[in-house]
Image (cartoon, coloured by chain):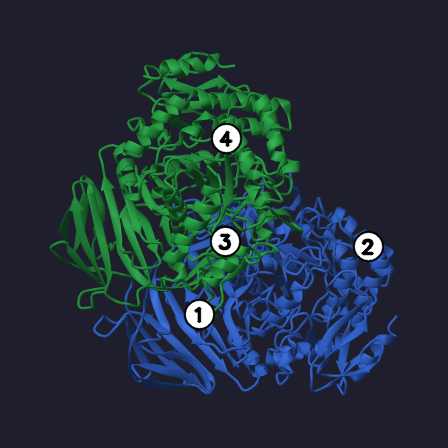
Chain colours: A green, B blue
Amino acid sequence: MALEAQGGGFVLTLGDTTILEHGADAPCLFVGRGVPNIEGARGHYEIDDYVVERIALRHAEIDGGTIRLAPHEGAPWVLALRIAAEGGNAEIAFEALDPAINRLWLRVPAQPGEHVWGGGEQFSYFDMAGRHFPLWTSEPGVGRDKSTLLTWQCDQKGAGGDYYHTNYPQPTWISSRRYALHVDTSAYAAFDFRHPGFHEIEVWEVPARIELWARPRFTGIVTALSDRFGRQPPLPEWLLKGAVIGLKDGAESFERLKAYEAAGVAISGLWCEDWVGLRITSFGNRLFWDWQWNADRYPDLPARIAELDARGIRFLGYVNPYLAVDGPLYAEAAANGYLVMRPDADEPYVIDFGEFDCGHVDFTNPRAAAWFADTIIGGNLIDFGLSGWMADFGEYLPIDVRLANGMDGMRAHNAWPALWAEVNAKGVAGRGKTGEALFFMRSGYSGAQRHCPMLWAGDQSVDFSRHDGIGTVICAALSAGLLGNAYSHSDIGGYTSLFDTIRTPELAMRWSEMAAFTAMMRTHEGNRPRLNTQMDSDPQVLAHFARMTRIYAYLAPYLRKLSDEAVATGLPVQRPLFLHFEDDPHTYAIQTAYLYGADLLVAPVIEAGRSDWSTYLPAGADWVHVWSGETHKGGQDVTVPAPFGQPPVFYRAGSPDAALFAGLSALG
Amino acid sequence: MALEAQGGGFVLTLGDTTILEHGADAPCLFVGRGVPNIEGARGHYEIDDYVVERIALRHAEIDGGTIRLAPHEGAPWVLALRIAAEGGNAEIAFEALDPAINRLWLRVPAQPGEHVWGGGEQFSYFDMAGRHFPLWTSEPGVGRDKSTLLTWQCDQKGAGGDYYHTNYPQPTWISSRRYALHVDTSAYAAFDFRHPGFHEIEVWEVPARIELWARPRFTGIVTALSDRFGRQPPLPEWLLKGAVIGLKDGAESFERLKAYEAAGVAISGLWCEDWVGLRITSFGNRLFWDWQWNADRYPDLPARIAELDARGIRFLGYVNPYLAVDGPLYAEAAANGYLVMRPDADEPYVIDFGEFDCGHVDFTNPRAAAWFADTIIGGNLIDFGLSGWMADFGEYLPIDVRLANGMDGMRAHNAWPALWAEVNAKGVAGRGKTGEALFFMRSGYSGAQRHCPMLWAGDQSVDFSRHDGIGTVICAALSAGLLGNAYSHSDIGGYTSLFDTIRTPELAMRWSEMAAFTAMMRTHEGNRPRLNTQMDSDPQVLAHFARMTRIYAYLAPYLRKLSDEAVATGLPVQRPLFLHFEDDPHTYAIQTAYLYGADLLVAPVIEAGRSDWSTYLPAGADWVHVWSGETHKGGQDVTVPAPFGQPPVFYRAGSPDAALFAGLSALG
C-alpha cells in the first residue's frame, strides 16, 4: 500500500489498485449528521434518513501514515485516517475528531465495466454494479419485485420487500479490479454502485476501520476473506449420506418417513421443527417458542430418536433466539435478568409475533449467552439427542432496546445474527460436537462465518419467480460464498405459499435437482403444508426426489473433498464461474449457473415448462455433459435436454474425479 | 419586520411571528450541491437527488439589512440575504456568493398544532402539516394512493401517482400562525412539514427571494396573495345561465344537446373538444392536435354555432400547447423557428403522445408566443366563434430542452403552465374578450392566477376514492383558492375510467350536486364514453342533472356577487371554513366541506351508498338547512338527510341573501 501526496490531496494504492483518490476539487470523504427515521415491525423495516449536514472534506494533510482532514484549509480537523499495510492487506482506521459526526461517506474509484460482488447474501443481483444496496438485516420480504402483484399484496400487509432486502447483509465487496473491501461496522450502511466513476460507501457512524485485500487471483481474495471472517468446520459425515427430510406432523412424521425409505430415498436425517410443540393461532399452527421437547406432540421422542439412530438416521429440531412469555424458559430468563429490556421501563422488551409475545435473550450479557448456549443448546437440544437444528431468525432486534453491555440498538441490530450464531456454536462446542452437530441459519452479518456451520437461504416463494423463487438461492450461495460462507443450502421446493402461489410438482422436482449439487439437501413442508406439493404427496415427485438424493449421496466423496478444501482454503462449495475462469470475462456476471467445486458446472433449470436448458460454458476447458457423455468446448453457450432427473450438469474434462462423474449417468 | 442579532445568530420577525431563527448551534440555512436524476415520460416524473454536499451556514454577520453567512467563522462568505419590509410585507433576497451552490434548504420555525395550507392545487391533503410536498408540475397520476390495486396497476404502466402529485404546484404556504410564505423560484422545490420544530424548504437553486405576508386575519392574507399573483376577471355573464355540456360526438353532439334542453337542463354552452377532429389510434379515438376547426368531424360548424347562439347557448372547444407533426400548424411553427429544440441537434424536440409525435411551441420566444396567441387563440378559436375552451396540458416540458431565451429546462418546466396561461390570456385580450371568452386549465404554477380565468381540477377517477375521486376536487379548490385562484370547477362525474373503475349513476348525481355550488358546471363524457354513465344515458340522472343546473342558474345573482368580491378582494368562490371562522379551531383541518361565498356551507356527499350525511357547522353562526329550513346552532356536527337532489347545504342565518337561499327548497 502506498500513500502519496498528489496536488493538495493524496492517492492511496494497494498493489496496482487505486483505492482512494482525494483532491480539494474531488474529495473522496464526506462527513455529516443524519436523523434516522426507522419504522420496524416483525423483521420488516422502513429506513429513512434526514441528512442534516454532509460536508466534503476538501483539505488533507499527510503526516507519515496519518491523514487529517478538514472541510477546508484553516478549519478545525474533523477526521483522521491512519493507514497501515502489509503485503496485499491494508487497513484504514478512522477517528472522528468532531463528536457531532454520525455519518460518513467514502468514494472509491470505479471503472467502466467493473463488477462488484458480495454485500452478504444477496438474493437478486450477484453483480451489484449499477445498483444501491442498503445493508440491514431484515426479512427479505415476499415478494422482492415491485412489478409483481404478489409484492404489492404483501406490501399492503407490511410484508413486501425489495431487491436488496436480505437476512444476511455484510458491508464487504469484491471488485473485479481484484481487491476486497470491508467496512468494520455494525451500524446501518449502504453501498451505492450507481455513480459513474466511483462507488460510494455510506455508514451511519464513523466506522472503526476499512479493511482491504488485494490478491492477484480471485481465489486468493476469497481465502483472505475467510481468514478474516472465520471458516466453518468440515461437514459432518452423517450429513453426506443423503437428504434431511423435513416433516412437522408430530408423531406421524415417523410413519411418513417410512414411505421415503421405502421409495429408496437416501436419508441422513429427519427434521421436525415442531418438536417443541404447537401453538394454535387464528393464522394456523405455529411452533411453541420454548426450546425443549414437547411430549404431547412427540411422545417417547428419546426412544424414537434411538430407533432412527439405529437405522443411521439423525434427528434434527428447531430453535430461535426468542422466548414466548408463557413458556417456562422466559420466566427463568426474566428472573435472571437475561432479557433485552425496554428503553423506558424496567421491563423485558417483548414483541408480538402474531397472537403471542416473546422476549429476546440478551446475547450481549455473557451470562445470558452462556445460559442459552449451555442450558438450551447444550442441554435441551444436544444432550436430548438432536444432531442439528434450524437456528431461525436473528433479524428482529428492535432499535430502541436497552442491552446489558450498553450497545445501542442501531449498532446491535446488524450485529445480532453473528451473536446468535456464536451462541449456537458455543453450545455445540461445549458438548464437543463441533463438526458433528449441524445447525443452519438464514440470518447473518460480518463474523457469522466463524460460528455458523451452514447457511440456509431463508424463505423463498414456492415458485419460479425472478426475485423470490428458486433462482434466488443460487445468487445467495454465490454472494455469501465469496465472503467466507462455504456451505449453503435451501428449503427444497421453497417455503412461502401466499395468495395464489402454490408449490407444483414441477417446482419440487427442479428444486431437488439443484439441491443434489449443494452442500446439503433438506426438504421443508412450507408454511401451508396441506395446500402444497410435498415430496411424499405424489409418486413421481417422490421417485424423482429419491433419485436426486442418491446422486447427492453418490457424490459424497467429492463433497468431502470440497469440504476439506473449504476448511483449508475457505473456498465455498458453490462457486461463481469466474472464480476458476477469471480470464473469461463472460463468466463475471453469471448468476444462474455455478461451479460445484472446481470441476462440476451446474446450471439448474429455474424456469417452468422447460424440457431443455441453455448455459454458458467457460473458456479454457472442455466440458462433459454428465447424462449424455457429450463433450462441449468451453467459451460458448450450449443447449442440452433437461428432462426431470437430468439437471444440466457438466464436468471438466480431465478432472481427477472424472470417473466418479462419469458414473452419474449409470445411477438408477 | 425586525431583524435582531441574537447570540451569534439572528432572529427575523414579521409582526409577532418569528420567521427565521438562526444560531451557530441551530442554523436555519443550508446550502450545497446536488446531482438530480429525473426520469420523465408523458407528464410522469421520477425525481431523485444525489446530495453531494449540504453545508450548515453556522456563521452569520449582520450589516444593516444584509446578513452574510458562512459555514463558520473565518470561512469565505457563501450566501448573502437582504431583508426588506414594509408593513406586514417582507422580502428576503438571496445572493449566492459561491457559484457551485445549486441547493438551498431553509428552516422556518414551526409550532405544535400548526396548520399549513397551499402548495398550489393539492388533491389529497388540504392541511399539509406532517407531510412532505415535492413541487413539480406533472400528471397527478391514477391513482394517488399506494394502498389501492388501481394505483399499483397504473404504476406498472408508469401512470401511477402519489398524494403530492399535482398539475398545479406552487411554492407558497399559508400558516395558521397567520402569515404566508412564497419562494420566488421555478426550480424544483419541496416543502417538508414532517419535522417537529421547523418546516424545511428545499430549492434546487438559490432562489431570487422569499416573500412574506403577515396579516391579522386569514382573509387579509388571501387578498395579499391575490394582489401578488394576480386576480381573475369576473365570470362571464353567459356562464351563469347554466351548465356547459361536454359532448364529443361530432355533429351528433348537437342532436344530443336537444335531449338536454328537452329535459329542462339550464344550459350555458356546448363544449365539443373534438371540434379539431379525431385521430384513430390503437388505444381508441384521440383528438387531432392541430388547433383549428375540422370540417369532417363538424360540418357547417359556423352555422351550428350561430344556431346555438340564437338559443343563448355558447360553443366551446379545445386546445393544448403541442402541435402534431403531421398537422399544418406544426409545419408553420417549425418553419418559423417557433418550436422547442432538442439539446443535441438542430431539430425540434418532439415527444410521443401515443402513436403520434408532437412538438412544443416555445413560449419563451416572444414571436412564437405571439403567434400562438394571435393566430391560434385569437384567429382559429375566438374569431371562429368559440366562447371558451379547455386549455389542456402544460405539465410535460422535458428538462433537456433548448429554449429561445436560454432558460434551462429544469427551471422552465414549472414555469411552463403560467406561460401557457399567459398565451391564452393574451389571445383573449387581443380580441377584447377578457371576462367574456372563458378558458379553463388544469396545469398551473405561481403567476398563472394573473392569466388563467378558471381552474379545472384535472382528470379525477370516476369514483368515490379518497385520493382520486370526487372528494379530491374540494381539496383542490380550497388549496388553490387560498393562493389567489378564485374560480375552480371539475369534470362532473370525473374523467378517468381505467381497469374496473366505471362511472355510476350515483356518482354522476353526487358530482352534479357538488358542481351546482361551484363557479362553473361542466360535464365531460370521460375517456371511455360508451362504458360510463352519461348525463343523457339514464332518465333519472338527466332529470337530477337538470334540477342541479337550475339550482346553479337560480343562484346566479349570488355567484355574481361572489365574482365581484373575487375581483375586488381576491377571495375565492369556494372557501375553507376557517377563512370566515378562524376563531373556531375545529374548522382548520376540514377539507370535505366548504363555504360557497361567506354565507353558504356546502358539504357534498362524497361517499357511495349514503342517504344521509354529517358535517361540522362552524361556531359563531346559526345555520339553516336549505331543504328542510331547520336551523342548527354552529359549533357542532349535524346529520341531515341527503337524498339525491338535496345535497347537504346550509345558509348562515341572517345572511343578506337569506331570501334567495330560502327559495332553493321551492325549486322544481
Badge 2 marks a residue whose secondary structure is: loop
Which amino acid does the dot numbered 1 rest on? Glu
Which amino acid does the dot numbered 3 rest on? Tyr
- Where does label 3 land, which residue? A322
- Tell me the mark number nearer the camera, choosing from 2 and 1: 1
**Is A476 on the left or on the right of A56, as rendered?**
right
The chain carrying label 3 is: A
- Tell me the mark number nearer the camera, choosing from 4 and 2: 4
Badge 1 marks a residue whose secondary structure is: strand
Marked residue nearer the N-terminal end (3 or 4):
4
Circles 3 and 4: CB atoms closer than 8 Å: no
The chain carrying label 2 is: B
Q: Which mark is residue B200?
A: 1
Marked residue nearer the N-terminal end (2 or 1):
1
Which amino acid does the dot numbered 2 rest on? Asp
Are tags 3 and 1 found on a single chain?
Answer: no
- Where does label 2 land, which residue? B536
Which amino acid does the dot numbered 4 rest on? Asp
Residue B587, above or below A442: below
* Residue B21 percent across, percent down from the top left: 38, 79
The chain carrying label 4 is: A
- Where does label 4 land, which residue? A309
